[in-house]
Image (spheres, helix red, strand yellow):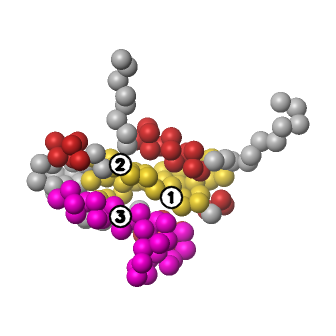
Amino acid sequence: MPGASVMPADPYVYAVLRVVPKVERGECLNIGVVLFCRPRRFLDARFELDRDRLRAFAPDLDLDGVARQVGMISGVVAGTAAGDALAEQSQAERFGWMVSPASTVVQPGPVHAGLTSDPGATLARLFEDLVQLPVADA
């Protein structure tokens, strides 16, 4: 379209967050995505805890413990975790904490990069592609 302005694309980084019930086995189930876009001052994460799917994957998994960990992670990402010094750090520092290797049940995958003009829409697309189960055609 003549005269239409196109939003410039900015770099972003993201990681899939996954449940690893037995660290020694290395098996995992994707439960979330965290995305950071420094130029747009955007840091956000989306999660889906499908309890039935997690129970089928790891029958002995402490689902309430996983939910508490995800809640804490969400608070740090949003900068609202009351009493948590991490929540008071910059977005870059909070993202760095999120993607640091961990031997807990909820772990980050590798960090990937891309370009976006809409970080929120990119996060939604990544979440749909990497976490949510595909919907079967009827």
| Residue visible at 28% across and 45% down in the picture | 50
Does residue 91 appear anywhere in the picture?
yes
Between disc 3 and disc 2, whose residue precedes?
A: 2
Q: Is residue 75 above or below residue 115?
A: below
* Residue denoted by label 2: 48
| Residue visible at 16% across and 52% down in the picture | 25
Give the label on residue 110, or none: none
| Screen quadrant of the C terminus | top left
Residue with the most extreme left position: 60
| Distance between mark 2 and mark 1 Cα atoms | 14 Å
Determine whether, in the image, residue 14 is placed left or right of residue 120.
left
Q: Is residue 39 above or below residue 55?
A: below
Determine whether, in the image, residue 48 is placed left or right of residue 76.
left
Determine whether, in the image, residue 69 is placed left or right of residue 52.
right
Q: Secondary structure at mark 3?
A: helix
Q: Residue 87: percent from the left, percent from the top?
A: 46, 75
* Residue denoted by label 1: 44
Give the residue type that dot 3 points to.
Answer: Gly
| Distance between mark 3 and mark 1 Cα atoms | 13 Å
Determine whether, in the image, residue 17 is placed left or right of residue 12.
left
Along the viewing direction, whichever of 73 and 108 lies nearer the viewer = 73
Label 3 or label 1, whichever lies nearer to me, is 3
Q: Residue 70: percent from the left, percent from the top?
A: 33, 61
Give the residue type that dot 1 points to.
Answer: Asp
Give the residue type that dot 2 points to.
Answer: Glu
Q: Residue 91: percent from the left, percent from the top?
A: 54, 69
Range drawn in magenta: 62-91
- What is the tally of numbered marks visible in this picture? 3
* Residue denoted by label 3: 71
